[in-house]
């Protein structure tokens, strides 16, 4: 997939460049607690500054539901961005309006301005025509560098791209190139590792990879539904009983396409009556002997060994979603071991999803160890499913 890069613009000096980024980062005690999504857009912003553009940044934060939420203002993001860029960042209290336009009019070449949370306006999600027009009037050129919301047809990433000369940012291009190679030039054996809690957002990916992958490894709450579909009792574990038929269909499709779908053979469990904590008293059981009172919270030792061996033999590994409740020490081993094996393999390794990134951060594993780490969760899944992402499609058309 070819996208028109911002590098292709011949003269950006003095131009007002609207840059849509994904600065939807966690905030704790008024500070950014994880700056990964800010860091990935730095190359685009730094390129624009080098070209003497006037850089006007758009982003959302959280889910304010179209209303101003003081806890979701982008002020902490502005502070972190200023720290990382090592240049002054002016933060405004809105993203449209006369006051915003007046401030932008005063901008000098090479300055950076961060507009307020776009989702403080319900018109953002609605891609409302007048709101799009207001945002577009603030810039001469539009750059989309927000892969994390590329599957959303919103005003600040889709609507504006229809109104202004539109280009892809450097991070967006990197995301698209990395994920495209999985679908267009998969290296065999191709292994998909899929975790997380629920099956809903991953049905499409499972169906797609049952056709193109050699092996699919399932963990997390997701695997429990498949174990139940295979006839295993999963005790008090998270299990989507209304998705059992869907799981059976995916299992049949994988078998028909000679794709090996591997489920855990043993599991780390906790009695459902006990509170999950760093001091939880865990037990390990084979999946055909899970007591009714127990809930599955991580892969067992045998499963970790089996998954690791399969990953070591792969030429390309795609991983989305932790395989256990990694936030707590007693249930982190499965995700940690898989991360380490992916780190050490010579295969192409493409990881993604917010929880996967959080796990890498917790285990202090450098992103540089992998071929690509995607900052998109839902966008990554939809891309790999083969869907067209609205905000990317409009860039191709414009």
Image (tube, grey):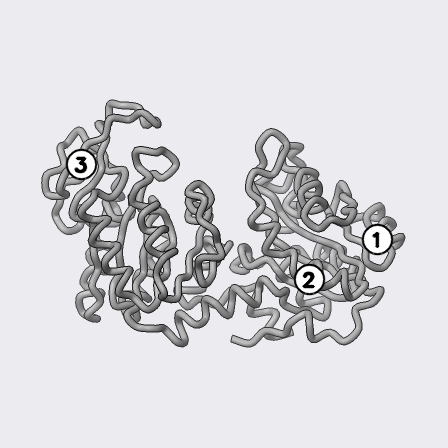
Residue 336 drawn at (x, y percent): 34, 45
* Local SS, label 2: helix
Compared across the picture, whether 129 is left or right of 196 comes to: right
- Residue that numbered label 1 is attached to: 104
Separation of marks 1 and 2 at Cα, in angstroms: 17 Å
Dot 3 or dot 1, earlier in sequence:
1
- Residue that numbered label 2 is attached to: 160
Compared across the picture, whether 72 is left or right of 306 comes to: right
Q: Residues within 10 Å of mark 2 (few under 14, many from 20)?
A: many
Judged from this view, the residue extending furthest toward the right is 106
Q: Residue at x 28, y 26 (%)?
A: 280
Dot 2 or dot 3, earlier in sequence:
2
Q: Disc 3 vs disc 1: Cβ atoms closer than 8 Å?
A: no
- Residue that numbered label 3 is attached to: 284
Residue 13 drawn at (x, y percent): 83, 67
Q: Residue at x 14, y 32 (%)?
A: 292
Residue 367 drawn at (x, y percent): 48, 54
């Amino acid at each position: 997939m070819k996208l028109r890069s911002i590098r292709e613009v011949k003269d950006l000096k003095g131009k007002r460049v609207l840059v849509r980024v994904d600065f939807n980062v966690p905030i704790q005690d008024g500070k950014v607690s994880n700056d990964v999504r800010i860091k990935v857009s730095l190359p685009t912003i730094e390129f624009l500054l080098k070209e003497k553009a006037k850089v006007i940044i758009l982003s959302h934060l959280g889910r304010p539901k179209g209303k101003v939420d003081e806890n979701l203002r982008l002020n902490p993001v502005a502070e972190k961005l200023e720290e990382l860029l090592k240049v002054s960042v002016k933060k405004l209290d809105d993203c449209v309006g006369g006051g915003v336009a007046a401030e932008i009019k005063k901008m000098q070449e090479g300055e950076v301005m961060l507009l307020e949370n776009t989702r403080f306006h319900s018109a953002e999600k609605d891609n409302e025509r007048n709101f799009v027009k207001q945002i577009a009037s603030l810039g001469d050129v539009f750059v989309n560098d927000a892969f994390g919301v590329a599957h959303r047809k919103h005003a600040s990433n889709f609507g504006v791209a229809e109104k202004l000369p539109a280009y892809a940012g450097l991070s967006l291009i990197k995301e698209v190139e990395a994920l495209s190679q999985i679908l267009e030039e998969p290296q065999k054996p191709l292994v998909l590792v899929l975790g997380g809690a629920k099956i809903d957002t991953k049905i499409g990916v499972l169906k797609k990879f049952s056709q193109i992958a050699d092996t699919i490894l399932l963990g997390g709450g997701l695997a429990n539904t498949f174990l139940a579909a295979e006839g295993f009792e999963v005790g008090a574990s998270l299990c989507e009983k209304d998705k059992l038929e869907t799981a059976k269909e995916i299992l049949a499709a994988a078998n028909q396409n000679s794709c090996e779908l591997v489920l855990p053979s043993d599991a780390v469990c906790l009695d459902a009556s006990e509170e999950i904590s760093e001091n939880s008293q865990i037990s390990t059981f084979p999946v055909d002997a899970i007591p009714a009172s127990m809930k599955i919270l991580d892969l067992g030792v045998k499963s970790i060994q089996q998954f690791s061996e399969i990953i070591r033999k792969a030429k390309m590994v795609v991983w989305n979603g932790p395989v256990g409740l990694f936030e707590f020490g007693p249930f982190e081993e499965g995700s940690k071991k898989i991360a380490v094996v992916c780190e050490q393999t010579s295969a192409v390794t493409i990881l993604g999803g917010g929880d996967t990134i959080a796990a890498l951060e917790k285990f202090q594993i450098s992103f540089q160890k992998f071929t690509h780490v995607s900052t998109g969760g839902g966008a990554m899944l939809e891309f790999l499913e083969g869907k067209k992402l609205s905000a990317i499609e409009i860039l191709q058309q414009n």
